[in-house]
């Protein structure tokens, strides 16, 4: 914890050392709140000497730019490699307007909030209940993760379909998955997959994980690992059926019968892969919450 008078005496470099442990800023002014938000996400940070002098009238830019909060854009970018935190701010008064505007997500109160705060905010809490913020965060994380789940599923389908078609062409076969088959997969499998994965309800454990970084990729490393493992398994099975299928099922090599077997195996792989796509992290339990 820290009080506002101590906060205002810190240099930008000193504040950066304190921020990871700062939980409470007591007896602070609205301007302190604004500077704190600016330092965290870089929003509305002075970008040049003129903007800095407007924020600090009567101060000397050359000698005091590294001593006064919130700092300046070039120094802030070097200290954080150009990536700031994602900041949410709540407020209901007119004085909270600058901080709400500088934040990535500003939340104002619908009943007790002033018009200035409402206009500066991104979200208005209609019932003035802070529990609604928790629910909004929960649903936001759930929607984002559901989009990732479908991407993981969709990328696996496309990688396998393209690769098996390419390998078949090299081996001298006609395309085993023709346009009608791929259209069926896209209309039926992908549509149902999008509905199933995109409408999963949120789980309370989503609130236990740390927020994603601002520069986090939409497809994470665990997702690429899952895609690679599942695509490798499916391709191994399909290549085996492409090579050994005629002998196993007593059909002509490269015939419609042969490719129908291959297509059915491909479809069933996607059915089971849809369960696997429910997990996008390091914990693998695709059947939970069913």
Image (cartoon, rainbow, N blue to C red):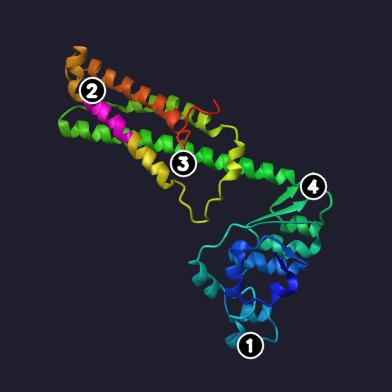
Residue 60: mark in rendering = 1
**Residue shown at 56%/50% (left/top)?**
211
Cβ atoms under marks 4 and 2 closer than 8 Å:
no
Q: How crowded is mark 1: few (under 14 residues within 10 Å), some or many (20 or more)?
A: few
- Tag nearer the camera, 4 or 3: 3
* Residue at 35% across, 28% down: 182
Q: Position of residue 87 (x, y in %)?
A: 63, 58
Identify which residue, 154 or 178, lies in the foreground: 154
For the C terminus, the quadrant is top right
Question: Badge 3: few (under 14), some or many (20 or more) residues near its Cα, within 10 Å?
Answer: few
Residue 46 in view in this figure: no
* Label ID, residue 241: 2
Relative side of 31 to 256, left or right: right
Residue furthest to the top in view is 250
Q: In this view, does 285 lie to the left or right of 22?
A: left
17 up-or-down from 169: above or below = below
Say which residue label 4 marks.
128
Q: Give the range drawn in magenta.
A: 231-240
Quadrant of the rendered structure where residue 177 is? Answer: top left
**Across the whole image, how many numbered discs are drawn on residues?**
4
């Amino acid at each position: 914890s820290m009080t506002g008078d101590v906060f205002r005496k810190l240099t930008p470099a000193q504040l950066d050392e304190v921020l990871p442990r700062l939980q409470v800023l007591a007896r602070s002014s609205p301007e302190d709140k604004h500077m704190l938000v600016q330092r965290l996400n870089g929003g509305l940070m002075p970008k040049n000497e003129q903007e800095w002098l407007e924020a600090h009238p009567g101060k000397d830019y050359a000698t005091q730019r590294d001593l006064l909060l919130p700092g300046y854009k070039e120094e802030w970018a070097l200290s954080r490699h150009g990536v700031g935190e994602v900041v949410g701010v709540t407020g209901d008064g007119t004085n909270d307007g600058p901080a709400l505007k500088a934040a990535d997500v500003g939340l104002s109160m619908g009943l007790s909030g002033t018009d200035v705060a409402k206009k500066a905010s991104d979200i208005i809490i209609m019932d003035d209940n802070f529990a609604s913020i928790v629910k909004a965060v929960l649903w936001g994380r759930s929607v984002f993760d559901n989009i990732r789940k479908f991407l993981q599923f969709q990328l696996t389908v496309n990688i396998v379909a393209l690769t098996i078609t390419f390998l078949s062409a090299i081996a001298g076969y006609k395309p085993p998955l023709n346009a009608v088959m791929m259209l069926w997969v896209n209309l039926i499998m992908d549509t149902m997959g999008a509905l199933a994965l995109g409408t999963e309800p949120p789980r309370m454990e989503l609130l236990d994980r740390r927020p994603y970084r601002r520069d986090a990729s939409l497809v994470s490393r665990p997702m690429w690992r899952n895609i690679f493992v599942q695509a490798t398994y499916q391709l191994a099975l399909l290549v085996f059926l492409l090579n050994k299928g005629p002998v196993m099922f007593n059909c002509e090599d490269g015939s419609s019968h042969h490719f129908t077997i291959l297509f059915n195996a491909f479809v069933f792989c996607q059915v089971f892969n849809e369960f696997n796509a429910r997990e996008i992290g390091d914990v693998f339990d695709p059947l939970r919450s069913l």
